[in-house]
Amino acid sequence: MKKKLLSDSFIYGLPGIIGKLISVITLPIYSNVLSKADFGFLGFYNSSFYLLLVIFQFGLDNASMRFFFDENNKNKKAVIMNWILFQFIITLIFGLLFYIFNGLFIDKLYSLYQFNVNFFIVYFLVLISYILPSIIEVYFRIQQKAIHAFTFAIVLTIINVSSTYYFIVLESKGYMGFIYGQLLSYSICSLLSILLLYKRISFQQFNFGLLKKMLKYSAPIVPSTFMSIGISWLANYAIIISNYGIEETGIYQMANTLAAVINLITSAFLQAYIPFSFSIMTKENSKTEYSKILNIYILLMCFVILGYSIFSYDILAIFINKKFKESSVVIIFIVYYYFIASLPTIINIGNTIKMNTTAYTKSMTVYTLITSVLFFVLIPKLGAVGASISMIVGQVFNLMITYYYSQKNYPIQYNILKNFIVILFSVLLSIVFYFLFKDLTFSYYMFFVKIIGYVIIGIFILYLNKKTIKGI
């Protein structure tokens, strides 16, 4: 059972990892054909897309899994049909409202690109075409068909990458090439989804009574999800309306995409850690193990992040167009943000064991409020760096609140002082390296000097943490 869970988790997560890696690999190509403003638009477009998706789905992805396995629900197929019809109707209603009031959005947000109503038509066609591909993946997971879900996701990724490359590079459609690529790939996969589903579900299976129960179940989930994704949207929006403008949003987007490598590492660890933490919670020494795991995780991640931040400028200089060189300092802050954002999930083990879900909502609310206020204080002064610092500070508060409630429910003796010193040491070294090399032109000689410095630091860290390393 455990082996199947781990293997399925790996299979489900692999397409996402491949997709993000492809995004990073294709950056050198797109950085040469797209402007900073184009990247800025794509950052805002993506965050807007997923924010609207939270509203349109309304948590029915979670509700579908719950009610499909509800022993009191005899009509399993109605669960999927309810989700399809609800999201389709809500998307159409919002699309009609955007069509009617499109002038407001063009004037406020997109005047730089001189968009017209056709953009919003394409935008909502993308949202509509995404409905079935997103549902079919969940449907396969409900059926516990991991290989089917993996195959479908890989097909979608391949078509999306190919069509995006075609429209951006070969057809020179600029930022709109990304949207055309999405529309083509989602449309093709929607047709494929219809072929896979048409014999399994039908409109006659729609059950309004069941839909009301599903919406009642999913409604409490929506606010926290909306806040989590809304922060990304607000960061892009706050930069756009500041004096820095949409080109600064492009700098921020480039840094975010490159920093996604660290997000991949933290996400992979958390996917493995969560089931593992539950598997040992009844053991006598489980609390000691939780503490050791946190120590090792912080130590190794700080070393990895330190290296990534040290070589951020070199990565940009070697692989990315020089117009994005300002992203190097932003990368340093964002990689630490991704790392700090992963810590509440680890610390939250006490709340999850005791099934206290309110702590997450409280900490996320505080994180959202603090980060939102800081956006409008720091972004006008520091631009993309201000956005990154704001999110780090918000996550620190999230971490502290999560720690407080987790310790209250399930005390674990973490080595807080040592872990704090490790993180602080890593941050200070990142800052020192940045100021030492920020005014120097890239050369392979300086790159070699950095490597030597990084290796020496690694040896020093290994020596000071021999006991912790032996615990791996």
Image (spheres, rainbow, N blue to C red):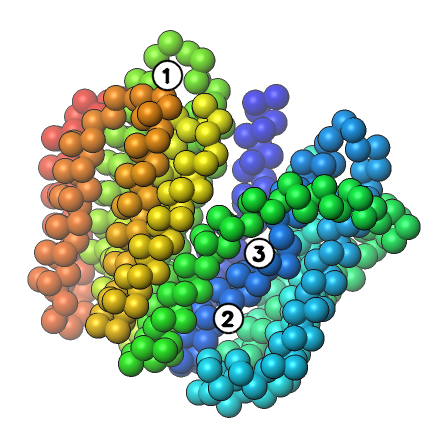
Screen quadrant of the N terminus? top right
User: Given the image, on which type of amino acid does mark 2 rest?
Assistant: Tyr
Question: Which numbered tag is attached to residue 286?
Answer: 1
Q: How far apart are marks 1 and 2 (CA)?
A: 44 Å
Can residue 128 be spotted in the picture? yes
User: Given the image, on which type of amino acid does mark 1 rest?
Assistant: Ser
Q: Is mark 3 on a helix, strand or loop?
A: helix
User: Given the image, on which type of amino acid does mark 3 rest?
Assistant: Val
Whole-percent x and y of residue 220? 56, 44
Which residue in the protein does label 3 denote? 54
Q: Is mark 2 on a helix, strand or loop?
A: helix
Which residue in the protein does label 2 denote? 45
Instruction: Indicate which label's residue lies in the foreground, 3 or 2.
Output: 3
Front-most of residues 295 and 407: 407
Q: Which residue is drawn at 46% across and 59% down?
A: 230
* Mark before the other along the chain sequence, 3 or 1: 3
